[in-house]
């Protein structure tokens, strides 16, 4: 046993040691280069077992403490937790992508940020412009559909690649898999971020929309031919020339433009009448693509938020602790 240990220290797994100084790695074959790099790693980390155990312990403890802190924060101050998570989800990926020079993602992120920033700015204005809710919902509805389609397409490409169907279109498995994963990532990432921004906009607009105040009582009277979301008239079909937009009547009797109320209820996840705050039975009113096994879908979204926003932060904290204790 002692002899085996002696071998391992002298050489690399019992082989003759290589003098590592002055080797030009670029001139070696791939196998030799891998061997040299492997030996360098061994040399560098010789006798560091206790340090590695310490680092693993720090990682484990930090993960547990971070979980407890995040769960407590989410339970006690949900709004600030939500905003912090959204900020992390919005900024951290682009910082990482800029660092690795992944410019395609940065381009999409920039486009998304400019339009979403403008829409969010419009949603926070006082008094709220009548057309703002509609544009807010149109934009987030478009994002929702795009991200959903991208996610599904990515998933299908990955599945087809696993079953070898990529060969039918003469695409390498690696290329097909990368493309599928990219589509899936874009779909999930932009889907979650736009959903969270939609929530922020909906909350802001609900506070400013004017028909009800913070007490929950309508602040002004709603005309029967008026849509409480956008404040524009609902044109009834009186003659052939009337501008007709499909309208929907809720259980409480209030009528809205279909696009306004669909946006209000579904994208902003507001399940109440914008005017009288009575609960809206969404399943009956809007059967369609939004119906999800909500708990599972919600958990998936939370997991993605955690992975994108908080995981890099936790790993950063671990690095700082290791550096502070001199564990390199």
Image: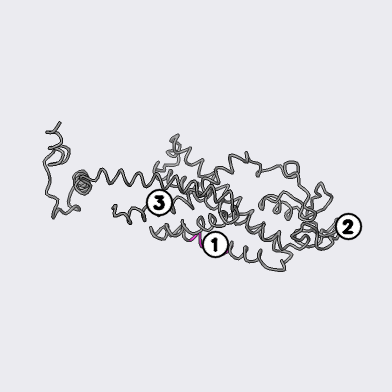
Badge 1: few (under 14), some or many (20 or more) residues near its Cα, within 10 Å? Answer: some
Colour pattern: one colour
Q: Earlier in the sequence, mark 1 or mark 2?
A: 1
Indicate left or right for 197 with 218 as reference: left
Task: Name the foreground residue: 24 vs 192.
Answer: 192
Q: What residue would you read off at disc 3?
A: 315
Q: What residue would you read off at disc 2?
A: 238
SS of the residue under disc 3? helix
Mark 1–mark 2 CB contact (< 8 Å): no
Measured as percent of width and height from the top left, residue 280 is found at 76, 47
Q: What is the total number of numbered labels drawn onto the structure image?
A: 3
Q: What residue would you read off at disc 1?
A: 113
Mark 3–mark 1 CB contact (< 8 Å): no
Task: Name the foreground residue: 20 vs 187.
Answer: 20
Q: Is residue 57 magenta?
A: no
Give the Cα distance between marks 3 and 2. 64 Å
- Give the label, 3 or 2, closer to the camera: 3
Indicate left or right for 32 with 80 as reference: left
Give the Cα distance between marks 1 and 2. 42 Å
Q: Earlier in the sequence, mark 3 or mark 1?
A: 1
Give, as a single range, the part of the protein colored magenta. Answer: 107-115
Give the Cα distance between marks 3 and 1. 26 Å
């Amino acid at each position: 046993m002692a002899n085996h240990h002696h071998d391992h220290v002298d050489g690399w797994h019992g082989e003759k040691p290589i003098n590592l100084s002055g080797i030009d790695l670029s001139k070696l074959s791939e196998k030799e280069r891998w061997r040299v790099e492997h030996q360098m790693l061994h040399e560098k980390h010789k006798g560091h077992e206790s340090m590695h155990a310490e680092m693993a312990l720090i990682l484990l403890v930090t993960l547990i403490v971070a979980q407890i802190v995040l769960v407590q924060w989410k339970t006690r101050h949900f709004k600030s937790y939500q905003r912090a998570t959204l900020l992390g989800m919005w900024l951290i990926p682009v910082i990482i992508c800029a660092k690795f020079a992944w410019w395609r993602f940065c381009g999409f992120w920039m486009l998304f940020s400019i339009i979403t920033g403008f829409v969010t700015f419009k949603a926070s204005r006082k008094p709220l412009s009548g057309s703002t809710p509609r544009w807010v919902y149109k934009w987030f509805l478009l994002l929702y559909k795009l991200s959903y389609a991208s996610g599904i397409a990515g998933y299908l490409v990955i599945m087809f690649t696993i079953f070898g169907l990529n060969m039918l279109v003469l695409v390498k498995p690696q290329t097909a898999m990368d493309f599928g994963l990219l589509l899936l990532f874009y779909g999930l990432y932009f889907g979650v971020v736009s959903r969270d921004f939609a929530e922020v906009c909906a909350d802001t607009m609900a506070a400013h929309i004017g028909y009800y105040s913070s007490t929950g009582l309508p602040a002004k009277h709603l005309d029967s031919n008026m849509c409480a979301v956008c404040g524009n008239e609902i044109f009834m079909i009186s003659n052939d020339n009337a501008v007709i937009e499909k309208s929907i009547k809720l259980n409480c009797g209030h009528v809205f433009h279909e696009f306004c109320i669909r946006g209000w209820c579904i994208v902003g996840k507001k399940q109440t009448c914008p005017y009288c705050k009575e609960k809206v039975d969404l399943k009956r009113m809007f059967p369609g693509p939004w119906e999800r096994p909500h708990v599972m879908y919600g958990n998936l979204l939370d997991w993605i938020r955690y992975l994108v926003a908080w995981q890099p932060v936790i790993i950063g904290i671990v690095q700082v602790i290791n550096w502070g204790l001199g564990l390199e």
